[in-house]
Image: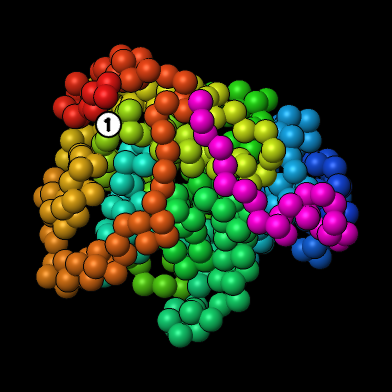
Amino acid sequence: MSWSPDPRPDWVAAVNRGDAGPVVDEARRPFDPHLLMAEALVRQGRAPDDRAALGDDAFVEPFTLFCHGLENEADLTVIGRWMSRRMILRLLEVRIQINDYLAADPGTLDEPIDQPIFVIGAPRTGTTVMHGILAQDPAHRAPEGWELLRPVPPPDPDPDIRATDPRIALAGAELVMPQTVASGMLAIHEYSGRMFKECLSAMSFEFRSEEMVSRTDVPSYQAWYDTADLRPAYRTYRRVLQILQRRMPTRRWVLKSPAHLQGLPALMEVFDDARFVITHRDPTAILPSVTSLIATMRWAHSERVDFAAIGRYHLELYARSLDNLIDLIDSGRLPSDRTAQVPHRQVSTEKLAAVRSVYEQLGMELSTDAEAAMSAYVDATPPGKHGEHRYEFEDLGLTRAEVRARFARYIERFDIPVAGDG
């Protein structure tokens, strides 16, 4: 076992020592769900006991469990407490804003979300690359980071006004913060206010999201989430998309998150005409890569990171999720004409060929303008521009044979080349 995180910047070390008074004072406030809800309400100009403004109570149980985990289980640093607290307040405040907006303009709920494309697949299989390329089609729209973090009010239809929306900088500061706290994060996954964003950010408004367990080690919340009904999160996500397109021309949404593998039945119920692009990769490459990402994210929040424990959890999580994916496909619940399968090696080395394959599998037409825009995007976003993501399989504490055995059904079903023992 050799995984060790990069040293934190000096300013982060100073904050964690308690040398930054205002940040420390805010970070020391308890993760009390009642106090946090009251603070969010006051920030939005409401009475501290106006719980109705937060919407229905479906979020309260996971929110309370998450707060308990942060206070008692996650072993957060000062900066970790501060970042977690800021995230919670934003989520609660945006809940209020969403409810207010829909009350003022109920017609928003009639906005059609027609045949959205969801890019799924296990993490580190090329979902981000594929999502970005598909978003270049002029007929498509992918949500940007600031739109999912702060969707109310809807973006201005004027592109010049939209480009200067102050929410871009506000959301960007929050998204970039973990990259400045954990030095190695940028080489693994880049975030910014204007980059395309994963669906998790909107699902988090219901506190039913893998975003919570990606950042922090909260076992009590994790145990609840592993068997949770995710339909409330997907319904809220749909409402967020409806708000985002309320003032804009309707285009097909292109959406993305590997976490959808864990929630496919709920997703398909809420988005019943969705199409899917599923990326595939050797599990012996998936596991150390995604574990490195989550370990680094948790390192931004805590001094205690158990790389091997995260790896073991991912072994079971994704083996189970990919077996469930096969069941959905083979049973016909996930129809083949609404599903495109793409190997990671093609996404990595033949990006445009991969996209052409997706359009063909889904029975969609790839226009000349779309292909030209995709080609320009690929040229402008070379891999590794922020450094190489380094990780070692051995840090998982697993053998390659063990991983191959656990993913045997997935490997055979999709004919995935797997690295040898080396």
Q: Residue 335: x percent and y percent?
A: 22, 34
Vertical position of residue 238 compared to residue 104: above or below: above
Q: Count every numbered label the image shows and give the total.
A: 1
Q: Which residue is mark 1?
A: 282
Q: Which residue is rendered at x = 42% and y = 60% of the image?
A: 386
Q: Position of residue 113 (x, y in %)?
A: 37, 55
| Depth check, front residue: 316 or 204 | 316
Image-quadrant location for residue 153: bottom right
Residue at position x 31%, y 54% in the image: 129
Relative to 67, residue 247 above or below: below
Q: Which residues are magenta?
A: 1-23
Asked if residue 419 is among those painted magenta in the image, a careful observer would answer no
Q: Secondary structure at mark 1?
A: loop
Residue 5 in the image: x percent, y percent? 57, 42
Evaluate whether residue 272 shows in this view: no
The quadrant of the image that shows the C terminus is top left
Please tell me which residue lies in front, 81 or 324. Answer: 81
- Horizontal placement of 59 versus 20: left or right? left
Q: Quadrant of residue 110?
A: bottom left
| Left or right of 297 in this view: 319 | left
Image point 42% across, 19% down: which residue? 398
Quarter residue 45 falls in:
bottom right
Closest to the observer, 259 or 247? 259
Residue 309 makes an appearance in the image? yes
Disc 1 residue type (three-letter): Asp
Q: Residue at x 86, y 47 (%)?
A: 28
